[in-house]
Image: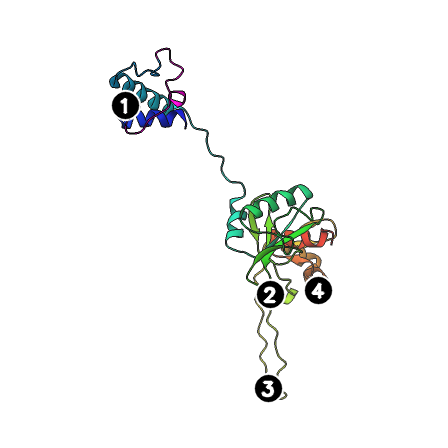
């Protein structure tokens, strides 16, 4: 029994340390006092006063702040059984596996045992033949970004015609008269080109002047936002 518990019992018994609940002198919060109550030498008022003072002193002690949980969005995704993958180092892999185990998520087949730390990617998804939500090796779909504790949805590759907003036009039937209409394009101010080692930003106005805007090969490497270009570049540059 803890000392604070004995003090609360004596307080609740209005200073009586024997009835109805008897406290052994060795466990009492007053055992270190010179005038200990081993022979019940103190009256109830003194014991009650000491108990109240001890409780007040105990409750006044500052309590250690509980550390906030790390990676709250990652933990929530595990609890929600979200399908995603993450690029890892051995140290990060061990950290995420440890968190996953605490959230009752383990490896497919091998369970809650730290392993496969040398693999570059791990993913979290349900098993194909059961509702169990587990850890696999692999990477596809939504990506988890450890630095920001956030998720990035996959970006589908689009053709230059789709990017420019040009709809495919079926050839007219023979004999039909087609009136040509100008195509109005709404282009962003800048586009981002993904190459082997960098992401290059280009002004659309400059592309119009030098003729690059007409290059199909260029538009196969270009994206309208830096975020899309970054995701594609990350997959392009990462070792498989």
- What residue would you read off at disc 1? 16
Q: Residue at x 61, y 49 (%)?
A: 112
Quadrant into which the C terminus falls: bottom right
| Residues at marks 3 and 1 touching, judged by CB atoms closer than 8 Å | no
Q: Nearer the viewer, residue 240 or 228?
A: 240
- What's the mark number on residue 129? 2
Q: CA distance from mark 2 to mark 3?
A: 56 Å
Crowding near the residue tagged with mark 2, few <14, some 14–19, many ≥20 C-alpha atoms within 10 Å: few
Crowd band around label 4 with a 10 angstrom C-alpha radius: few (<14), some (14–19), many (20+) = few
Q: Residues within 10 Å of mark 1 (few under 14, many from 20)?
A: many
* Magenta span of residues: 16-35
Which residue is label 3 attached to? Answer: 176
Tell me the distance, in whole angstroms, between the alpha carbons under discs 4 and 3: 30 Å
Residue 56 vs 151, above or below: the answer is above
- Which badge, 4 or 3, is on the more N-terminal residue? 3
Quick check: is 31 in the magenta stretch?
yes
Percent coordinates x, y for residue 185 in the rendering: 58, 64
Is 196 left, or right, of 162 in this rendering? right
Q: Is residue 77 magenta?
A: no
């Amino acid at each position: 029994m803890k000392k604070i518990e004995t003090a609360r019992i004596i307080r609740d018994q209005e200073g009586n340390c024997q009835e109805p609940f008897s406290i052994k002198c060795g466990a009492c919060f007053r055992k270190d006092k010179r005038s200990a109550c081993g022979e019940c030498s103190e009256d109830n008022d003194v014991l009650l006063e000491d108990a109240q003072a001890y409780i007040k002193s105990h409750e006044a002690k500052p309590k250690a702040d509980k550390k906030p949980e790390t990676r709250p969005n990652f933990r929530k995704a595990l609890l929600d059984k979200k399908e995603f993958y993450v690029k890892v180092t051995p140290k990060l892999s061990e950290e995420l596996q440890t968190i996953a185990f605490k959230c009752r998520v383990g490896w497919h087949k091998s369970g809650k045992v730290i392993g496969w730390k040398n693999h570059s990617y791990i993913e979290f998804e349900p098993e194909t033949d059961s509702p169990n939500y587990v850890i696999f090796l692999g990477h596809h779909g939504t990506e988890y970004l450890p630095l920001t504790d956030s998720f990035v949805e996959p970006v589908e590759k689009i053709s230059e015609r789709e990017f420019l907003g040009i709809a495919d036009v079926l050839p007219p039937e023979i004999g039909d008269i087609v009136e040509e209409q100008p195509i109005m394009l709404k282009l962003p101010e800048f586009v981002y080109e993904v190459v082997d080692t960098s992401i290059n930003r280009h002004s659309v106005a400059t592309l119009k002047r030098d003729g690059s805007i007409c290059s199909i090969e260029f538009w196969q490497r270009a994206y309208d936002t830096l975020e899309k270009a970054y995701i594609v570049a990350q997959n392009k540059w990462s070792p498989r």
